[in-house]
Image (cartoon, rainbow, N blue to C red):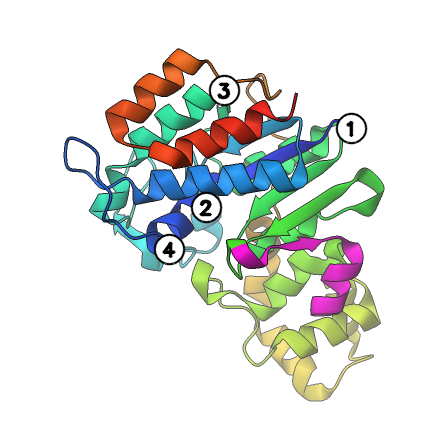
Amino acid sequence: MTDRLMLLDTASLYFRAFYGVPDTVKAADGRPVNAARGLLDMIAKLVMTYEPTHLVACWDDDWRPQWRVDLIPSYKAHRVAELVETAPDVEEVPDPLEAQIPVIRAALDALGIPVAGVPANEADDVIASFAAQSAMPVDIVTGDRDLFQLVDDAHGIRVIYTGRGMSNLEVLDEAAVVEKYRVLPAQYADYAVLRGDASDGLPGVAGVGEKTAATLLAAHGDLTGILAAAETGTGMTAGVRAKLLAAADYLAVAPTVVEVVRTLDLPVVDTQLRTPDAATVASLGAEWNLGSSLDRAVSAISAQH
């Protein structure tokens, strides 16, 4: 079996599980375990379908890093539950999901899946750094389109996109990104900067949507080329030029916010999948009523040997 590293955008997956799986099943202490069970079922399907030999659950040690907020204060501002002066802001997370985070961490540990995060950085940055520093092909599992910027055929980096649900997974290579958005993965961060993203509080350039962003990138290559053309007034309409020049302050900082960090000093973790310890798994399953979902994840991981 060819070595392949799978990187999970963990929060993206457990949020999807929480909202997609009924909360009727509960642990002995009364807390729901739908997000934990749903995540385990996702892991089972992903491992069985794509057969990774190595796996990391990438974590948001800081879901809204201050260095990004300093550049664009609206960045994820609509998801803040509480501003914190000396630590990461508190994200708005439903209480029944918050209660399951320790269960999710314990389940990942029992399966032998390392959790990796880096202070002052998001899971996106951790994923980007693992992918950039990996010597083996990489599958990135996420519902976040921003990670399309990492797709790289030459280095075997694909995105398994969960945005349409686990029953409609999309495997994106360079051709698939171009087909969907008319930009290369290497242009995707600039495309996102121009278009904006309301879900992340990125305003974009007023009046520039997906079609115009793609057209500009096709004509000028990247944001630097677009801004140079806007300065001289070549290769674009007067209206588009005016919109770009009006957004100059935003465009000066937005690329740093949108581009993922590929050079983090990553924690040293054992990423190789191994058969989980039966006693540990049995104890955890009984304590938290994880049932067949945990069994399926164990079977999928054990089958990779």
Q: Which residue is mark 1?
A: 2
Q: Which residue is mark 3?
A: 112
Q: In which image quadrant can residue 252 be found?
A: bottom right
Few, some or many residues within 10 Å of mark 1 (<14, 14–19, 20+): few
Q: Position of residue 26 (x, y in %)?
A: 21, 39
Front one among 206 and 275: 275
Q: Amino acid at mark 1?
A: Thr
**Is 179 a magenta residue?**
yes
**Residues under labels 1 and 3: Cα distance?**
20 Å
Q: Which residue is mark 4?
A: 20
Q: Earlier in the sequence, mark 4 or mark 2?
A: 2
Q: Give the number of callouts.
A: 4
Q: Earlier in the sequence, mark 2 or mark 3?
A: 2
Q: Earlier in the sequence, mark 1 or mark 3?
A: 1
**Residues under labels 1 and 2: Cα distance?**
25 Å
Please name which of the two marks, 4 or 2, marks the residue nearer to the observer.
4
Q: Amino acid at mark 3?
A: Gly
Disc 3 on helix, strand or loop?
loop
Q: In which image quadrant can residue 214 be found?
A: bottom right
